[in-house]
Image (cartoon, grey):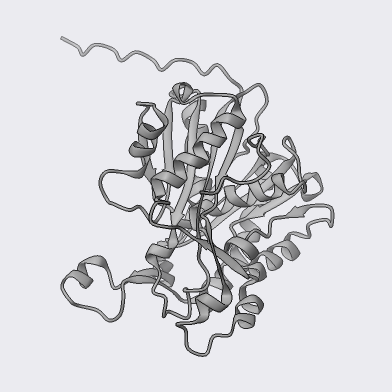
Amino acid sequence: MPPAPIAARPAPVTTGERLLGLGAYRPRRTVDNDEVCGPLEDVDPDWVVARSGIRTRRFAGVDETVVAMSTAAAGDALTAAGLTASALDAVLVATMSPDTASPQVSTRVAAELGTTAPAFDLGAACSGFCYGLEVAASLIRGGTARHVLVVGVERMSDLLDPRDRGTAFLFGDGAGAVVVGPADEPGIGPVAWGSDGGQADLIVHSPTWQEAARGAGDGVPGLRMQGPAVFRWASTQIAPLAEKALAAAGVGVDDLDAFVPHQANNRITDGIVRALALPDGVAVARDVVDTGNTSAASVPLAMHALLTGGEVRAGDLALVCGFGAGLTYAAQVLTLPPVAPSSAPREG
């Protein structure tokens, strides 16, 4: 007997997808360069500013877990979208700093929000949020989901060796979230993305947890980075990636209202801005100055800062891109979403 036919997926009821709402959470504690440079040898606070643009970053407290920060940001994103958690068909959390391997961050966030929607974590480091946007848009486009929550969250302070002069001053903590849903007109352009695992050793966690448990390896398990090599890679590869995303969306730099790159380093951002020849009227996200590099949370936090700072408005056109460990990279053109009525990112 031949096998029974598989029913077709339901036809999509939309011609596009867009960001319906945005929320953010920044931890209570602000850490300046004087504090973070204390344990470092021969690292001056002014040198940190010159090399990265970073003046402060936020470090999460004991109660500001990845779940708590994600839930707070997600709640504001739902409010901005005019929805409740019951409307969610999937919950996606992008992070490289989960507090446990199991259970996942996403399932606990879903539970905190009060939904039993399918939930999963995505690990693509600093590209995680942009990867998540494409996954969400694909779920909606394919008819599997109508509303998807995408969270980027990090407690990078958990991954740092405070004595590592290459990384200790770069990273911070926080969460950003968006609700992605259907739209009559596309609000998320085609993604340009990829990976380069051949250069995975440029950003690594060393020694590994297994090595540390066996007493092998030197030093505290922490994030290590070959800074000059990463800088050269990002400075030469991300502008062509952004150009592919612009071409795929059918827009040019003159059509943009904002550029929101991963907040890795102000000097990298400056190089990309020059390479793209962005017009002066395009708002460029500089959240790294006050927030540091928050990996998967970087892009949504930077979008939120631009919107709440009045530099752009909901409905404006933005080019976003993520890049980092893996190596991974992704870029999209999108229409900026509304934020929750409160003009400030939620803090504990």
Residue at the bottom extreme of this rendering: 42
Q: Provide residue 205's location: percent of width, then percent of height.
A: 35, 68
Is 316 placed above or below 220 here? above
Q: Relative to 169, is 106 on the left or the right?
A: left
Q: Provide residue 232's location: percent of width, then percent of height.
A: 58, 73
Quadrant in which residue 286 is drawn: bottom right
Q: Provide residue 227's location: percent of width, then percent of height.
A: 51, 76
Residue 281 visible in image? yes
Residue 18 visible in image? no
Is 220 placed above or below 245 here? below
Q: Relative to 100, is 45 on the left or the right?
A: right
Quadrant in which residue 342 is drawn: top right
Q: Quadrant of the N terminus?
A: top left
Residue at the right extreme of this rendering: 280
Residue at image position (28%, 52%) is 100
Residue nearest the observer in this picture, 101 or 330: 101
Is 257 placed above or below 238 here? above
Q: Provide residue 317's location: percent of width, then percent of height.
A: 73, 41
Residue at image position (64%, 76%) is 49
Residue nearest the observer in this picture, 297 or 18: 297
Residue at image position (52%, 52%) is 297
Is 61 placed above or below 8 here? below
Residue nearest the observer in this picture, 1 or 283: 283
Residue at image position (59%, 67%) is 56
Q: How many marks?
A: 0
Q: Relative to 136, is 274 on the left or the right?
A: right
